[in-house]
Amino acid sequence: MTQGDTRSDKQPRTERGRRTLRKLLDAAAGEFGDHGFHDASISAITARAGVALGSFYTYFDSKDAIFRALVSDMSDAVKQAARAAIDPAASALEIERQALLGFLNFAAEHKEVYRIIDEAEFVDPANYRAHYETIGKRITERLATGGVKGDLRPDLGEVEAWAIMGMNVFLGLRYAIWACENDGAAEDVASRANRILERGIGRV
Amino acid sequence: MTQGDTRSDKQPRTERGRRTLRKLLDAAAGEFGDHGFHDASISAITARAGVALGSFYTYFDSKDAIFRALVSDMSDAVKQAARAAIDPAASALEIERQALLGFLNFAAEHKEVYRIIDEAEFVDPANYRAHYETIGKRITERLATGGVKGDLRPDLGEVEAWAIMGMNVFLGLRYAIWACENDGAAEDVASRANRILERGIGRV
DNA sequence: AACAAACTTGAAAGATGGTTCATGTTTCGG
DNA sequence: CCGAAACATGAACCATCTTTCAAGTTTGTT
């Protein structure tokens, strides 16, 4: 799915090939995560993967191509993580808390994913935009469902979804990626953010 | 202030020099905004500025240096724009609405600023982080002031500030940078976001 | 076992674009 | 109006990487 369509003629056909492809993808995630797209070199990727420089082009047409493949994979992984953290039977507000908590935990454990998706804004803008638009749609749906269930206001839409998404992403940046010791735990951050959604920030 | 400290020995000493420096800065903002840091070339910057390639190095030590100078300037400009949009006499909630509205308008008119600051995450991470930490602190202060005045809950802190900042940045991305015709006006977006801060998203 | 396809290898080609520099021109105080 | 400092110029230098390629090795099938 991620690379289903015009995946050129580069898919591996043997077990060995599949192993090498995976090694390249993992190495690329590490290099792009550590150094960013432009300071990561293909030779560093192949060195980290333990394969020859030329082998890279057996699997990818270009440096851009492997980055794009990575963005697709990671975009899927983020969505997957958020979905897995949610109990669909919970209240709409509780679902949003769980989604944020799931995202914070995922980001803390996969900082390189965060960075690669962010850099896609410049290296692969279409995919970057698609990533956030997909998530935005999903949140919009959850808000609509919450409205129908009576948990939420019935007039919530895309604007509110993007506001929530922005909240989550920035809290991820600050408390998962840049975390320092005297920061509260992820649970605490998620609860405080959820409190905003519950009753706003106005005087009680 | 922006470049006060170790500004190397590159400051212009004549009127002509100051003009050339400004032309380079403006051209760089355009090129970096249009093509991103790595696809923007110094020769394109000097061409756009209408000066010779070599003149660049009369004013900046490197490509990185001009980008950093730009990030500092633009970081100041963003803060300035938000401050200018605020009426300090208004209620705490109204102040947040005005700040967001000011930011949305500024972003729409200076899309390149948005992009350059975003790319600083990779080209000039320290400045990027400083930018958001400064804004985060300012919002935290506003929330504390609002708490004292009785407009807001008294228990608001950094987490809430970053949540608000993330909201604002993502709404800027979606509705100022990626704006399309059938999107609501900035006023509408700011009001809807403010409604979240007023009473959350729960059923009325 | 034998053969074709898949895969691996690393040196070298090729391109790009940042940076330097020697030379020429302009500015501006005295 | 003179001279020194500031500024301008653009060809050439250079370092860096991406990408190619021709030659070898492994895999899997018949």
Image: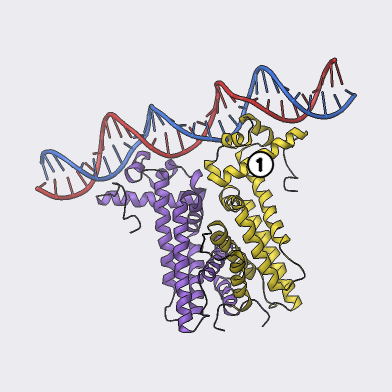
Chain colours: A yellow, B purple, C red, D blue
Element on which disc 1 rests: helix
Residue named by callout 1: A25
Q: Chain of mark 1?
A: A
Classify residue A166 as left or right of residue B137: right
- Residue occupying image coordinates x 48% and y 66%: B136
State the image coordinates of residue B71 (x, y, percent, origin top left).
Answer: 43, 55
Residue B193 in picture, x, y percent from top left: 58, 73
Closest to the observer, A168 or B159: B159
Q: Position of residue A148 (x, y in %)?
A: 75, 76
Identify which residue is drawn at 48% across, 45% down.
B40
Judging depth in this view, the residue of C30 and A45 nearest the camera is A45
Residue B196, image quadrant:
bottom right
Relative to residue A41, is residue A56 drawn left or right? Answer: right
Whether residue A56 is visible here, answered yes or no, is: yes
Q: Quadrant of the C terminus of chain A?
A: bottom right
Q: Is residue B195 left or right of residue B116?
A: right
Depth order, front residue of A17/A175: A175
Res B137 → quadrant:
bottom left
Q: Which residue is rendered at x = 55% and y = 68% of the image?
A: B163
Q: Position of residue D29 (x, y in %)?
A: 87, 28
The correct choice, above or below, for B154 with respect to B122 in the image is: below
Task: Decide: few, some or many residues near mark 1? Use Cα within 10 Å; few <14, some 14-19, many ≥20.
Answer: many
What amino acid is labelled 1 in the image?
Answer: Leu
Above or below, comparing residue A45 to residue B7 in the picture:
above
